[in-house]
Amino acid sequence: MRLGVLADIHANHPALEAVLADLPPVDGLVCAGDVVGYGPHPAECVERLREWDGRLVAVQGNHDRAVAAGADIGDGMAGAGVRHARAELDADALGWLDGLPAVRTAFDGCLRVAHGHPGDPDRYVYPSLFDESLLADERVLVLGHTHVQASAAFERAGWAGSERRLILNPGSVGQPRDGDPDAAYATLTLDGGGASPEVTLHRVPYDVERTVRDLRDAGLPTSAGERLRKGA
């Protein structure tokens, strides 16, 4: 089984389309949250992701939760993006975001997905904090939230059914923060029991300037566009 793994799309439709066009044939899609927020295209991104319903394993990010709840998270890029998404999405799309779980397991427990720390989805888990203590019974733990692409493998004799497990952050589709502006994603391969998971990290360029123009046209902060250009 091969899966596409995404996170932190952040309402950047050109980046999402570039990733989906680059994606090799997969059996399903995993999204570690924050489909919306910051960016100018919340409705398009929700609609595009929902086309995978039935083959999609998704969780709710902090921006998804704020948009669904109508929460005011203040001024600045984050608050502006939440208000924009709330205004752009219809009731059906808001209900879909609201119904996403904070943590989800799939594929007979082989995969666990959370936006941030699995015990606290709003807590950042940077690559330096990847540790086997984060793992429970799953073979692969997928996280988002930091916008930093990384994976780490752990091997230990005595783990039931496998000595190899992975922690994966596929990076951000729509707002990378690791110094590379190209959209980030990953592909994950699981065998029948998930005993030997393998991950490949991918980057793909997209039309950053189109998203910058759309941010401006939507009245969103220009500082968000500068972050996209720098991957910061």
Image (cartoon, rainbow, N blue to C red):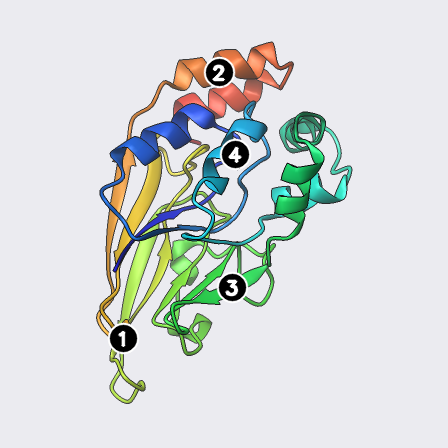
Q: Nearer the viewer, residue 103 or 201?
A: 103
Q: Which residue is mark 4?
A: 47
Left/right placement of residue 116 relative to residue 108 reads right
- The local crowd at label 3, few if under 14, some if 14 to 19, many if 20 or more residues have their Cα within 10 Å, is some
Percent of width and height locating residue 185: 33, 43
| Discs 1/4, front | 4
Percent of width and height locating residue 95: 68, 44
- The local crowd at label 1, few if under 14, some if 14 to 19, many if 20 or more residues have their Cα within 10 Å, is some
Q: Is residue 16 above or below residue 98?
A: above
Q: Nearer the viewer, residue 180 or 159?
A: 159
Numbered tag placed on residue 104 in the rendering: 3
C-alpha span from label 2 to label 4: 21 Å
| Discs 2/1, front | 1
Indicate the secondary structure of the residue bearing disc 4: helix
Left/right placement of residue 66 relative to residue 215 reads right
C-alpha span from label 3 to label 4: 21 Å
Q: Which residue is mark 1?
A: 193
